[in-house]
Amino acid sequence: KLSLWHNQVEHAGILSFESVAKSIAAHHPEILHYFDNRSTNASAESFNAKLKAFRSVFRGVRDTTFFLYRVMKLYT
């Protein structure tokens, strides 16, 4: 169904759907993989957001080893 939709959008020539159609074509296997396994990368995205917030609080960290230790203790 996804391929059929993509083909119809491509042939319709609707300019506003061009970027959506390109994104779907580029990520077609990943989109279908979700429906097979019902798994997403939401946990990785959540961790990245937490890490970004942590870095903003501790801007200018000089001791990288200690920084990574704190991240590990706070978010694992």
Image: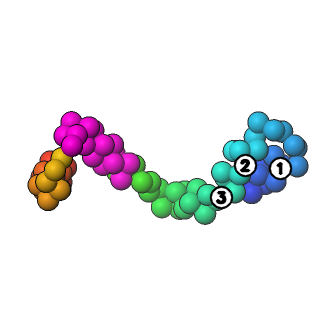
Count residues near mark 1 (Cα–Cα under 10 Å), then give few for <14, some for 14-19, many for 20+.
some
Q: Secondary structure at mark 3?
A: helix
What SS does tag 1 mark?
A: helix
**Which span is picked out in magenta?**
44-60
Give how far apart the Cα atoms at labels 1 and 3 are.
14 Å
Locate residue 73, reporting x and y percent.
12, 52
Residue denoted by label 2: 21
Q: Main secondary structure of the magenta part?
A: helix
**Do residues under tags 2 and 3 come within 8 Å of each other at their CB atoms?**
no
Q: Quadrant of the C terminus?
A: bottom left
Residue on which the image places disc 3: 26
Please give left or right for residue 71 compared with residue 37 in the image. left
Q: Relative to residue 28, is residue 8 depicted above or below? A: above
Crowding at mark 2 (Cα within 10 Å: few <14, some 14-19, many 20+): some
**What amino acid is at disc 2?**
Ala
Which residue corresponds to mark 1? 10
Q: Give me the C-alpha separation between circle 1 and circle 2.
A: 7 Å
Residue 18, magenta (yes or no): no
